[in-house]
Amino acid sequence: MSDIHELEKQILSSINEAGDLAALEKIRVSALGKKGSVSALMKGVGKLPPDERKSFGQQVNGVRQALDKALAEKKTALADAALAERLATETADISLPVRMGPLSEGRVHPISQCMEEISEIFADMGFSVAEGPDIEDDFHNFTALNIPADHPARQEQDTFYFPKRADGSRLVLRTHTSPVQIRTMETQKPPIRIIAPGRVYRCDSDQTHTPMFHQVEGLVIDEETHMGHLKWVLEEFLKAFFEVDEVQMRFRANHFPFTEPSMEVDIRYERSGREVRIGTGDQWMEILGCGMVHPNVLKAVGYDPDQLQGFAFGVGIDRLAMLKYGMPDLRDFFSADLRWLKHYGFSVLDVPTLAGGLGA
Ligand code: DAH
Protein backbone atom coordinates (compact mmCIF):
# COMPACT_ATOMS: atom_id res chain seq x y z
CA MET A 1 0.00 0.00 0.00
CA SER A 2 2.68 2.48 0.95
CA ASP A 3 4.25 1.82 -2.48
CA ILE A 4 1.36 3.50 -4.14
CA HIS A 5 1.71 6.62 -2.05
CA GLU A 6 5.45 6.64 -2.52
CA LEU A 7 4.89 6.44 -6.28
CA GLU A 8 2.30 9.21 -6.15
CA LYS A 9 4.64 11.44 -4.17
CA GLN A 10 7.47 10.88 -6.62
CA ILE A 11 5.37 11.65 -9.66
CA LEU A 12 3.82 14.71 -8.06
CA SER A 13 7.23 16.08 -7.24
CA SER A 14 8.52 15.49 -10.78
CA ILE A 15 5.39 17.25 -12.12
CA ASN A 16 6.20 20.12 -9.85
CA GLU A 17 9.74 20.33 -11.17
CA ALA A 18 8.92 19.98 -14.88
CA GLY A 19 10.49 22.91 -16.71
CA ASP A 20 8.44 22.89 -19.90
CA LEU A 21 5.43 21.29 -21.61
CA ALA A 22 7.51 18.58 -23.29
CA ALA A 23 8.92 17.42 -19.95
CA LEU A 24 5.43 17.46 -18.48
CA GLU A 25 4.09 15.32 -21.31
CA LYS A 26 6.89 12.78 -20.76
CA ILE A 27 5.90 12.48 -17.11
CA ARG A 28 2.26 12.05 -18.05
CA VAL A 29 3.04 9.26 -20.49
CA SER A 30 5.37 7.45 -18.09
CA ALA A 31 2.68 7.49 -15.38
CA LEU A 32 -0.69 7.40 -17.12
CA GLY A 33 0.19 6.30 -20.65
CA LYS A 34 -0.61 2.80 -21.89
CA LYS A 35 2.57 1.40 -20.41
CA GLY A 36 2.77 3.91 -17.55
CA SER A 37 3.50 3.00 -13.94
CA VAL A 38 0.04 3.92 -12.65
CA SER A 39 -1.66 2.19 -15.57
CA ALA A 40 0.34 -0.94 -14.71
CA LEU A 41 -1.04 -0.85 -11.15
CA MET A 42 -4.54 -0.57 -12.57
CA LYS A 43 -3.95 -3.63 -14.70
CA GLY A 44 -2.82 -5.56 -11.59
CA VAL A 45 -6.14 -4.93 -9.85
CA GLY A 46 -7.83 -7.83 -11.61
CA LYS A 47 -5.32 -10.31 -10.27
CA LEU A 48 -5.92 -9.44 -6.60
CA PRO A 49 -8.17 -11.51 -4.34
CA PRO A 50 -11.74 -10.15 -4.55
CA ASP A 51 -11.79 -8.66 -1.05
CA GLU A 52 -8.75 -6.46 -1.79
CA ARG A 53 -9.75 -5.55 -5.28
CA LYS A 54 -12.21 -2.82 -4.49
CA SER A 55 -10.21 -0.81 -2.02
CA PHE A 56 -7.00 -1.08 -4.05
CA GLY A 57 -8.84 -0.08 -7.21
CA GLN A 58 -10.23 2.95 -5.44
CA GLN A 59 -6.78 3.94 -4.26
CA VAL A 60 -5.28 3.71 -7.73
CA ASN A 61 -8.16 5.74 -9.09
CA GLY A 62 -7.59 8.37 -6.42
CA VAL A 63 -3.95 8.59 -7.48
CA ARG A 64 -4.94 8.92 -11.11
CA GLN A 65 -7.28 11.78 -10.32
CA ALA A 66 -4.69 13.55 -8.19
CA LEU A 67 -2.15 13.23 -10.99
CA ASP A 68 -4.60 14.44 -13.65
CA LYS A 69 -5.33 17.49 -11.56
CA ALA A 70 -1.67 18.23 -10.88
CA LEU A 71 -0.81 17.80 -14.57
CA ALA A 72 -3.57 20.18 -15.66
CA GLU A 73 -2.56 22.81 -13.12
CA LYS A 74 1.08 22.62 -14.06
CA LYS A 75 0.19 22.85 -17.75
CA THR A 76 -1.72 26.10 -17.16
CA ALA A 77 1.10 27.47 -15.03
CA LEU A 78 3.70 26.67 -17.71
CA ALA A 79 1.56 28.20 -20.48
CA ASP A 80 1.01 31.36 -18.40
CA ALA A 81 4.71 31.64 -17.72
CA ALA A 82 5.56 31.20 -21.40
CA LEU A 83 3.08 33.91 -22.37
CA ALA A 84 4.37 36.27 -19.70
CA GLU A 85 7.88 35.78 -20.97
CA ARG A 86 6.88 36.48 -24.58
CA LEU A 87 5.01 39.61 -23.56
CA ALA A 88 8.05 40.81 -21.63
CA THR A 89 10.59 40.15 -24.38
CA GLU A 90 8.78 40.65 -27.71
CA THR A 91 8.31 44.16 -28.98
CA ALA A 92 6.82 45.62 -32.14
CA ASP A 93 8.14 48.80 -33.72
CA ILE A 94 4.90 50.55 -34.57
CA SER A 95 6.78 53.46 -36.11
CA LEU A 96 7.93 51.26 -39.04
CA PRO A 97 6.41 52.41 -42.35
CA VAL A 98 3.57 50.27 -43.73
CA ARG A 99 4.65 47.77 -46.36
CA MET A 100 3.36 48.65 -49.83
CA GLY A 101 2.31 45.04 -50.41
CA PRO A 102 -1.33 44.64 -49.43
CA LEU A 103 -2.73 47.57 -51.43
CA SER A 104 -0.83 46.89 -54.60
CA GLU A 105 -0.73 43.09 -54.37
CA GLY A 106 -3.95 42.09 -52.59
CA ARG A 107 -7.04 41.30 -54.62
CA VAL A 108 -10.76 41.38 -53.94
CA HIS A 109 -12.32 37.96 -54.66
CA PRO A 110 -14.70 37.99 -57.65
CA ILE A 111 -17.56 36.86 -55.40
CA SER A 112 -17.04 39.78 -53.02
CA GLN A 113 -16.80 42.06 -56.03
CA CYS A 114 -20.08 40.70 -57.46
CA MET A 115 -21.83 41.15 -54.10
CA GLU A 116 -20.70 44.78 -54.11
CA GLU A 117 -21.89 45.23 -57.69
CA ILE A 118 -25.27 43.65 -56.91
CA SER A 119 -25.75 45.79 -53.80
CA GLU A 120 -24.88 48.91 -55.79
CA ILE A 121 -27.41 48.12 -58.52
CA PHE A 122 -30.24 47.37 -56.08
CA ALA A 123 -29.39 50.37 -53.92
CA ASP A 124 -30.03 52.46 -57.00
CA MET A 125 -33.53 50.96 -57.20
CA GLY A 126 -34.24 51.77 -53.55
CA PHE A 127 -33.34 48.44 -51.94
CA SER A 128 -31.36 48.19 -48.74
CA VAL A 129 -29.14 45.31 -47.68
CA ALA A 130 -30.39 42.94 -44.96
CA GLU A 131 -28.50 40.20 -43.17
CA GLY A 132 -29.25 37.04 -41.24
CA PRO A 133 -27.18 34.38 -39.48
CA ASP A 134 -25.49 31.52 -41.35
CA ILE A 135 -26.60 29.18 -38.55
CA GLU A 136 -30.38 29.14 -38.67
CA ASP A 137 -33.19 27.51 -36.78
CA ASP A 138 -35.78 25.25 -38.34
CA PHE A 139 -38.50 27.89 -38.14
CA HIS A 140 -36.70 30.51 -40.22
CA ASN A 141 -35.04 28.16 -42.71
CA PHE A 142 -38.12 25.98 -43.31
CA THR A 143 -41.36 26.28 -41.36
CA ALA A 144 -42.04 30.00 -41.76
CA LEU A 145 -41.25 29.62 -45.46
CA ASN A 146 -44.19 27.24 -45.78
CA ILE A 147 -41.98 24.14 -45.85
CA PRO A 148 -43.73 21.85 -43.34
CA ALA A 149 -42.02 19.10 -41.33
CA ASP A 150 -42.49 16.26 -43.83
CA HIS A 151 -41.99 18.31 -47.00
CA PRO A 152 -39.57 16.79 -49.55
CA ALA A 153 -37.82 20.17 -49.94
CA ARG A 154 -36.19 19.47 -46.63
CA GLN A 155 -34.40 16.53 -48.19
CA GLU A 156 -33.93 18.18 -51.55
CA GLN A 157 -31.94 20.92 -49.97
CA ASP A 158 -29.37 18.48 -48.56
CA THR A 159 -29.24 20.19 -45.23
CA PHE A 160 -26.26 20.23 -42.88
CA TYR A 161 -27.85 19.64 -39.48
CA PHE A 162 -26.27 20.36 -36.10
CA PRO A 163 -26.63 17.76 -33.31
CA LYS A 164 -30.00 17.72 -31.52
CA ARG A 165 -30.44 20.17 -28.65
CA ALA A 166 -31.99 19.32 -25.28
CA ASP A 167 -35.49 20.18 -26.55
CA GLY A 168 -35.04 17.89 -29.58
CA SER A 169 -34.69 20.74 -32.11
CA ARG A 170 -31.76 21.02 -34.46
CA LEU A 171 -30.04 24.11 -35.84
CA VAL A 172 -28.99 24.05 -39.50
CA LEU A 173 -26.51 25.76 -41.76
CA ARG A 174 -28.93 27.83 -43.81
CA THR A 175 -29.67 26.13 -47.11
CA HIS A 176 -30.73 29.36 -48.80
CA THR A 177 -30.90 33.10 -48.13
CA SER A 178 -34.72 32.97 -47.95
CA PRO A 179 -34.78 32.92 -44.09
CA VAL A 180 -33.58 36.53 -44.24
CA GLN A 181 -37.01 37.33 -45.75
CA ILE A 182 -38.60 36.08 -42.55
CA ARG A 183 -36.16 37.84 -40.24
CA THR A 184 -36.68 41.10 -42.10
CA MET A 185 -40.48 40.89 -42.01
CA GLU A 186 -40.36 40.04 -38.32
CA THR A 187 -38.45 43.21 -37.52
CA GLN A 188 -39.53 45.77 -40.13
CA LYS A 189 -42.79 47.35 -41.10
CA PRO A 190 -43.88 47.33 -44.75
CA PRO A 191 -43.18 48.69 -47.31
CA ILE A 192 -40.12 46.46 -47.51
CA ARG A 193 -37.51 46.48 -50.20
CA ILE A 194 -34.41 44.49 -49.37
CA ILE A 195 -31.75 42.25 -50.81
CA ALA A 196 -29.76 39.79 -48.73
CA PRO A 197 -26.53 38.52 -50.21
CA GLY A 198 -24.66 35.80 -48.34
CA ARG A 199 -23.31 32.30 -47.94
CA VAL A 200 -25.51 29.22 -48.07
CA TYR A 201 -24.68 25.57 -47.46
CA ARG A 202 -25.76 22.26 -48.91
CA CYS A 203 -24.30 18.82 -48.51
CA ASP A 204 -23.36 18.49 -52.16
CA SER A 205 -20.05 18.50 -54.02
CA ASP A 206 -19.17 17.88 -57.68
CA GLN A 207 -18.04 19.87 -60.73
CA THR A 208 -20.87 22.35 -60.52
CA HIS A 209 -21.72 22.20 -56.81
CA THR A 210 -19.72 23.20 -53.76
CA PRO A 211 -20.92 22.64 -50.17
CA MET A 212 -20.82 26.40 -49.59
CA PHE A 213 -22.01 28.83 -52.22
CA HIS A 214 -23.60 32.25 -52.49
CA GLN A 215 -27.07 33.59 -53.10
CA VAL A 216 -28.73 36.94 -53.07
CA GLU A 217 -32.30 37.06 -51.87
CA GLY A 218 -34.69 39.83 -52.82
CA LEU A 219 -37.94 40.78 -51.12
CA VAL A 220 -40.49 43.48 -51.84
CA ILE A 221 -43.63 43.78 -49.73
CA ASP A 222 -46.20 46.48 -50.28
CA GLU A 223 -49.91 46.85 -50.85
CA GLU A 224 -49.91 46.79 -54.62
CA THR A 225 -46.78 45.04 -55.74
CA HIS A 226 -47.31 42.68 -58.66
CA MET A 227 -45.47 40.43 -61.12
CA GLY A 228 -44.92 43.28 -63.56
CA HIS A 229 -42.77 44.94 -60.93
CA LEU A 230 -40.89 41.69 -60.36
CA LYS A 231 -40.12 41.32 -64.05
CA TRP A 232 -39.00 44.92 -64.36
CA VAL A 233 -36.71 44.74 -61.32
CA LEU A 234 -35.07 41.54 -62.57
CA GLU A 235 -34.61 42.91 -66.06
CA GLU A 236 -33.06 46.17 -64.82
CA PHE A 237 -30.81 44.23 -62.50
CA LEU A 238 -29.57 41.83 -65.16
CA LYS A 239 -28.94 44.60 -67.70
CA ALA A 240 -26.96 46.61 -65.18
CA PHE A 241 -25.06 43.61 -63.85
CA PHE A 242 -24.00 42.30 -67.26
CA GLU A 243 -23.53 45.85 -68.56
CA VAL A 244 -25.62 45.22 -71.68
CA ASP A 245 -28.53 47.12 -73.26
CA GLU A 246 -30.77 44.09 -73.68
CA VAL A 247 -31.25 40.82 -71.85
CA GLN A 248 -33.65 38.10 -72.82
CA MET A 249 -35.31 36.24 -70.02
CA ARG A 250 -37.39 33.10 -70.07
CA PHE A 251 -39.84 32.61 -67.20
CA ARG A 252 -40.64 28.95 -66.59
CA ALA A 253 -43.40 27.88 -64.21
CA ASN A 254 -41.95 26.04 -61.24
CA HIS A 255 -42.73 25.19 -57.67
CA PHE A 256 -41.32 26.76 -54.52
CA PRO A 257 -43.26 26.36 -51.28
CA PHE A 258 -42.74 30.02 -50.32
CA THR A 259 -44.09 31.59 -53.53
CA GLU A 260 -47.29 31.26 -55.53
CA PRO A 261 -47.05 31.42 -58.47
CA SER A 262 -43.39 30.40 -58.68
CA MET A 263 -41.05 30.71 -61.62
CA GLU A 264 -37.51 29.97 -62.65
CA VAL A 265 -35.74 32.43 -64.89
CA ASP A 266 -33.22 31.59 -67.61
CA ILE A 267 -31.19 34.12 -69.58
CA ARG A 268 -30.09 33.81 -73.16
CA TYR A 269 -26.35 33.59 -73.74
CA GLU A 270 -23.72 32.29 -76.06
CA ARG A 271 -20.13 31.26 -75.68
CA SER A 272 -17.51 32.08 -78.23
CA GLY A 273 -14.14 30.74 -77.21
CA ARG A 274 -13.57 31.88 -73.65
CA GLU A 275 -15.95 34.78 -73.99
CA VAL A 276 -19.56 34.66 -72.85
CA ARG A 277 -22.10 36.98 -74.46
CA ILE A 278 -25.31 37.74 -72.67
CA GLY A 279 -28.47 38.57 -74.58
CA THR A 280 -27.62 36.81 -77.84
CA GLY A 281 -27.13 33.21 -78.95
CA ASP A 282 -29.21 30.10 -78.53
CA GLN A 283 -28.29 28.85 -75.08
CA TRP A 284 -30.20 29.40 -71.87
CA MET A 285 -28.80 29.42 -68.37
CA GLU A 286 -31.00 29.09 -65.30
CA ILE A 287 -29.98 31.79 -62.85
CA LEU A 288 -32.75 32.42 -60.36
CA GLY A 289 -36.02 31.43 -58.75
CA CYS A 290 -38.77 33.90 -57.97
CA GLY A 291 -42.47 34.39 -57.43
CA MET A 292 -45.18 36.17 -55.46
CA VAL A 293 -44.77 35.66 -51.70
CA HIS A 294 -47.09 32.87 -50.52
CA PRO A 295 -49.91 33.99 -48.18
CA ASN A 296 -48.76 31.39 -45.63
CA VAL A 297 -45.37 33.09 -45.45
CA LEU A 298 -47.04 36.44 -44.80
CA LYS A 299 -49.21 34.83 -42.11
CA ALA A 300 -46.14 33.23 -40.47
CA VAL A 301 -44.74 36.70 -39.72
CA GLY A 302 -48.08 38.14 -38.64
CA TYR A 303 -48.89 40.05 -41.84
CA ASP A 304 -52.41 40.16 -43.26
CA PRO A 305 -52.31 38.59 -46.76
CA ASP A 306 -55.51 40.46 -47.68
CA GLN A 307 -53.70 43.74 -47.20
CA LEU A 308 -50.11 43.05 -48.16
CA GLN A 309 -48.46 41.24 -50.98
CA GLY A 310 -45.12 41.17 -52.69
CA PHE A 311 -42.51 39.28 -54.59
CA ALA A 312 -39.29 37.49 -53.77
CA PHE A 313 -36.39 36.10 -55.70
CA GLY A 314 -33.23 34.11 -55.03
CA VAL A 315 -30.23 34.33 -57.36
CA GLY A 316 -27.11 32.15 -57.43
CA ILE A 317 -24.23 34.61 -57.24
CA ASP A 318 -21.48 32.16 -58.16
CA ARG A 319 -23.15 31.41 -61.48
CA LEU A 320 -23.60 35.08 -62.27
CA ALA A 321 -19.92 35.66 -61.51
CA MET A 322 -18.85 32.74 -63.73
CA LEU A 323 -20.95 34.09 -66.58
CA LYS A 324 -19.83 37.68 -66.23
CA TYR A 325 -16.13 37.10 -65.74
CA GLY A 326 -15.72 33.92 -67.81
CA MET A 327 -14.43 31.70 -65.03
CA PRO A 328 -14.91 28.10 -66.14
CA ASP A 329 -14.75 26.06 -62.92
CA LEU A 330 -16.71 26.76 -59.76
CA ARG A 331 -14.26 24.90 -57.55
CA ASP A 332 -11.44 27.37 -58.36
CA PHE A 333 -13.46 29.99 -56.47
CA PHE A 334 -12.69 28.30 -53.20
CA SER A 335 -9.25 26.76 -53.83
CA ALA A 336 -7.40 29.78 -52.40
CA ASP A 337 -4.91 29.69 -55.28
CA LEU A 338 -3.15 33.06 -55.30
CA ARG A 339 -2.39 32.82 -59.03
CA TRP A 340 -6.09 32.46 -59.78
CA LEU A 341 -6.94 35.35 -57.49
CA LYS A 342 -4.30 37.52 -59.08
CA HIS A 343 -5.77 36.81 -62.50
CA TYR A 344 -9.48 37.10 -61.72
CA GLY A 345 -9.42 39.30 -58.61
CA PHE A 346 -10.09 43.02 -58.42
CA SER A 347 -8.04 45.89 -57.11
CA VAL A 348 -9.00 47.02 -53.64
CA LEU A 349 -9.35 50.57 -54.87
CA ASP A 350 -11.75 49.73 -57.73
CA VAL A 351 -15.01 50.18 -55.87
CA PRO A 352 -17.97 49.38 -58.14
CA THR A 353 -20.29 52.28 -58.89
CA LEU A 354 -23.00 52.62 -61.49
CA ALA A 355 -21.51 55.91 -62.68
CA GLY A 356 -17.90 54.75 -62.79
CA GLY A 357 -18.47 51.22 -64.10
CA LEU A 358 -19.11 48.12 -62.08
CA GLY A 359 -16.42 45.57 -62.82
CA ALA A 360 -13.13 46.90 -64.15
N1 DAH B 1 -34.63 29.65 -51.93
C1 DAH B 1 -34.63 29.09 -53.29
C2 DAH B 1 -33.48 28.10 -53.43
O1 DAH B 1 -32.51 28.25 -52.74
C3 DAH B 1 -34.51 30.17 -54.30
C4 DAH B 1 -35.72 31.04 -54.36
C5 DAH B 1 -36.76 30.72 -55.19
C6 DAH B 1 -35.79 32.17 -53.58
C7 DAH B 1 -37.89 31.50 -55.27
C8 DAH B 1 -36.93 32.98 -53.63
C9 DAH B 1 -37.98 32.63 -54.50
O2 DAH B 1 -37.05 34.08 -52.87
O3 DAH B 1 -39.06 33.43 -54.57
O4 DAH B 1 -33.53 27.24 -54.22
Image (spheres, grey):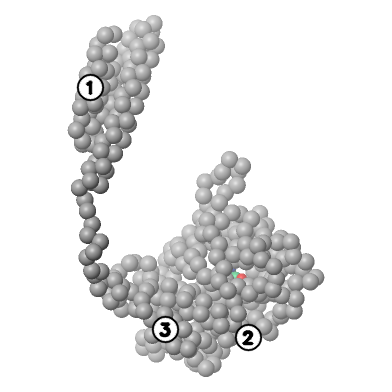
Lateral position of residue 292 relative to residue 123, left or right: right
Q: Residue at x 75, y 76 (%)?
A: 223
Q: Quadrant of the C terminus?
A: bottom left
Residue 153 visible in the displayed image: no
The residue indicated by pointer 3 is 359
Q: CA distance from mark 3 to mark 2?
A: 23 Å
Instruction: Find ligand 1 in the image and state its quadrant.
Output: bottom right
The residue indicated by pointer 2 is 232
Select label 1 or label 2 by which is in front. Answer: 1
Q: Amino acid at mark 1?
A: Ser
**Which one is earlier in the sequence, the residue at label 1 or at label 2?**
1
Viewer-proximal residue among 307 and 276: 307
Q: Residues within 10 Å of mark 3 (few under 14, many from 20)?
A: many
Task: From the top left corner, tell me how far across and down residue 222 is, in percent.
Answer: 71, 75
State the image quarter where residue 337 is shown. bottom left
Viewer-proximal residue among 239 and 23: 23
Q: Is label 2 within 8 A of ligand 1 (CB to nearest ligand atom)? A: no
The residue indicated by pointer 1 is 13
Q: Amino acid at mark 3?
A: Gly
